[in-house]
Image (cartoon, rainbow, N blue to C red):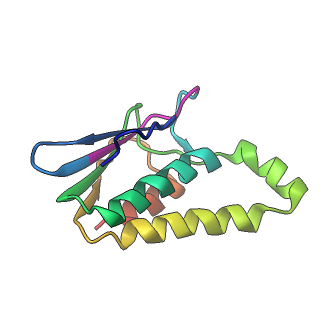
Amino acid sequence: MFEGLRFQHWRTAREDDGVVVLTLDRAASSVNALSRAVMDELGEIVERLSFEPPRGLVIQSGKPGFIVGADLTEFTSYAQNGRILDVLENGQRVLQHLARLPCPSVAAIHGVCLGGGTEMALACR
C-alpha cells in the first residue's frame, strides 16, 4: 500500500489483520505540532487509503502526548503572504477526507491533545 513512499513525519505500518497504523513523529521537533508539511503528508496517506481502504486505521503519536495543535510559528509567514485562510482550508480538507474513509478509524490519544489534535480525533470514527 505504501511501498516506495517515504514520509518525513509519519510512519506507516500495515498489520497482519489489515489494520493500518499511522504514527505521527514530527521530524526535528520534541512535540507533534501540525505543520503544513505534516498535513500535506497526511493528505497523501489518506488519499492512498481512500483507493485501498484498510480493515481499520489507528492514528497514534511517536512522542509523549498526542498532538499539541497547529505549528503557530508558521503563521507569521502565512500572515505576511496572506495565506492563512488557504492553509486552514487545506487542513480542514485533509481532515474531511480522513472522516470520509470507508473504514473504522481511531485516534489513540495518550497525553496532550489540543486544537488540531482534537479535530483529528473527531475526524476518526
Q: Is residue 103 above or below residue 12?
A: below
Q: Which of the 4 image quarters holds residue 46?
A: bottom left
**Residue 112 locus on image (x, y percent):** 44, 43
What residue is at 16 percent from the left and 42 percent from the top? 15
Q: Is residue 64 above or below residue 46?
A: above
> From the image, which quarter does the C terminus lie in?
bottom left
| Front residue (pair 7, 72) | 7
**Residue 107 locus on image (x, y percent):** 32, 53
What residue is at 80 percent from the left and 54 percent from the top? 78
What residue is at 25 percent from the left and 49 percent from the top? 20
| Front residue (pair 9, 67) | 9
**Magenta stretch: residue 79 in it?**
no
What residue is at 74 percent from the left and 46 percent from the top? 74
**Residue 43 locus on image (x, y percent):** 50, 57
Magenta-tinted stretch: 21-28
Q: Is residue 82 above or below residue 23?
A: below
Q: Which of the 4 image quarters holds residue 103?
A: bottom left
Identify the residue at the far left of this view: 17
Report how many numbered discs are placed on residues in the image. Answer: 0
* Residue 58 visible to an observer of this rendering: yes
Identify the residue at the far right of this view: 80
Q: Which of the 4 image quarters holds residue 4?
A: top left
| Front residue (pair 61, 102) | 102
In the picture, measured across the screen, residue 35 lies left or right of residue 118, that is right
In the picture, measured across the screen, residue 85 lies left or right of residue 119, that is right
* Residue 35 visible to an observer of this rendering: no
**Magenta stretch: residue 24 in it?**
yes
In the picture, measured across the screen, residue 51 lies left or right of residue 14, that is right
